[in-house]
Image: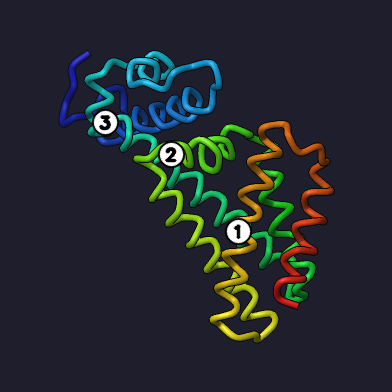
Amino acid sequence: MAVQSGTYRGVSAADRAAERRRRLLDATLSVWAAPDTRTTMTAVCAEAGLTERYFYESFTGLEQAQTAVLDDVATEIESTTLAAAEAAGPDPAQRIHAAITAFVDLLLADPRKGRVAIVEAGSMPALRSRRTELLRHFAHLAAEEAHETHRSRRREDELAGLLFIGGMAEVVTAWLDGVLDATPEEVVATASRGFLGLYG
């Protein structure tokens, strides 16, 4: 079939490239999260069912693909938890409980996302700085939430936010590694009490 103006079977060249990029990101997530699979461009391409030519169409290298996955997961966590907090209304305890529940539910729905963003990225020197930036961003979001609901001092809010997010990262790491024997409900309840205790 002839290709006219970059359109093939009704799909534009830009849309086809975007679909290939999404397949490569999904494949990167799967390969990266698999404990028995070495994360390589070859493995990612095989998982996506695409050649290296298409990999380089979207990314300069494996590190860029992994960074994109990390950023996508962080964006999803942020949008999901903020939406849950807003839906919970003005009560501080209900807001934080809803946000943490949404976060834990996200990890339960797809544990790969927590593993690559919180566990695996921290072990890679090339991605460690980006992971740190994202954790500090979430700490700032926690501080903003606390300031809005508790009207506390911003400097103390930022310190408490770092404590909370750093603690959550360690809890999730232990939980995903199977070291922490806790139910999702226990994680949510304990994390919620911890947040409220820091800002109470």
Q: Is residue 7 left or right of residue 110?
A: left
Instruction: Calculate the distance from the C-alpha at mark 1 to the C-alpha at mark 2.
Output: 20 Å
Q: Which residue is rendered at x = 69% and y = 80% of the image?
A: 149
Q: Secondary structure at mark 1?
A: helix
Q: Residues within 10 Å of mark 2 (few under 14, many from 20)?
A: many
Give above or below for 110 relative to 96.
above
Q: Which residue is rendered at x = 82% and y = 56% of the image?
A: 189
Disc with the residue nearer the chain's start (1 vs 3): 3
The image quadrant where one finds the N terminus is: top left
Name the amino acid type tagged 1: Ile
Instruction: Give the mark toward the camera: 1 or 2.
Output: 1
Q: Which residue is rendered at x = 61% and y = 54% of the image?
A: 80
Name the mark on residue 6: none
Q: Which quadrant of the structure image shows residue 118?
A: top right
Q: Position of residue 196 (x, y in %)?
A: 76, 70
Write down the residue under mark 3.
61
Q: Secondary structure at mark 2?
A: helix
Instruction: Calculate the distance from the C-alpha at mark 2 to the C-alpha at mark 3.
Output: 13 Å
Write down the residue under mark 1.
165
Scheme of image coloration: rainbow
Give above or below for 115 relative to 143.
above
Name the amino acid type tagged 2: Val
121 vs 81, nearest the viewer: 121
Name the mark on residue 69: 2
Q: Position of residue 44 (x, y in %)?
A: 39, 21
